[in-house]
Image (tube, rainbow, N blue to C red):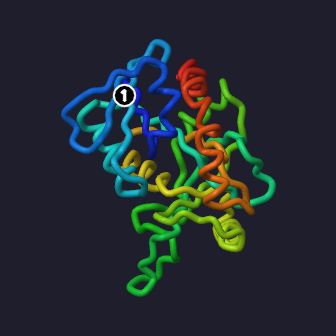
Amino acid sequence: MTIGIFTAVVTEALSFLDSGAVKLSGDGAFSVYKLNLGRYDAVLCCPPSVGEIAAASACQLLITKYNADVILNFGVVGALTDKTSLFSTVFVGDVVHYDMDTSEIDPLPVGRYECFDDVAVECDKALLKKALSVCNIPVVRCASADKFVSDAAKKTALNANYGAEVCDMESAGILFTCKFNNIPCLMVKCISDSLIGGADEYEQNCVKAAQNFMELATEICVGL
């Protein structure tokens, strides 16, 4: 089995790069590395930009060119409630792409894709169950869009409107790409900025929040 690993920015990938990852060539603007996760071969991809489109493109590259059988995403996220503490680690159970809005031409609510049954799109249940068997951490809903959310009132509104506990700028692109390719994905997130924290808190905490991702990936792979 080949494991595809996606991180949105290099700071989220540092623990993987420090583990002896070897950079590959010939992938355009993408930075791609080969490494080992326990008994599995893994390929890590970092895109040239943050956001849903870059995330989707990176995951498609891992699937199409490197034949990834599963995608593992590691990233930092913002908390949408005061119950989610800084540096806590969570699995994403489902995702709401709250930027999606075709309500002016059809009866679908904001955030709903016609190809999915609900506004909240579930991650792979079987893969999540395996991960939980070796790493028992909370499972949350992620609100995802091409927006960095720092205002506490906006964060609270996302929680109230969609029941999401965290937010980021990549999870919808990751999950939907994997869904469309029938590839399971698992998303592991660490809180870098609190409900009342913003860009400054994110900048201050990003590296620390991502420092254990390689260790977590190795632990998770025991259950695969």
Q: Is residue 98 above or below residue 79?
A: below
Residue drawn where x is 57% and y is 18% of the image? 222
Seen at 45% across and 71% down, the residue is: 100
Q: Amino acid at mark 1?
A: Val
In the rendered image, which quarter is residue 66 located in?
Answer: top left
Identify the residue shown where x is 25% and y is 38%: 64
What is the tally of numbered marks visible in this picture? 1
Q: Kindly tell me whether residue 51 is visible in this rendering.
A: yes
| Secondary element at tag 1 | strand
Is residue 68 rendered to the left or right of residue 108?
left
Q: Position of residue 192 (x, y in %)?
A: 65, 48
| Quadrant placement of the N terminus | top left
Query: Picture coordinates of residue 91 (x, y %)?
Result: 62, 41
Return the residue found at the far top: 39
Q: Is residue 69 above or below residue 11?
A: above
157 vs 148, left or right, is right
- Say which of 110 and 129 sits in front: 110
Q: Residue furthest left?
A: 26
Using the image as rendered, state which of residue 170 and residue 172 is in the foreground. 170
Question: What residue would you read off at disc 1?
Answer: 43
> Residue 14, percent across and down?
50, 32
Frontmost residue, 82 versus 25: 25
Q: Residue furthest right?
A: 83
Q: Is residue 181 visible?
A: no
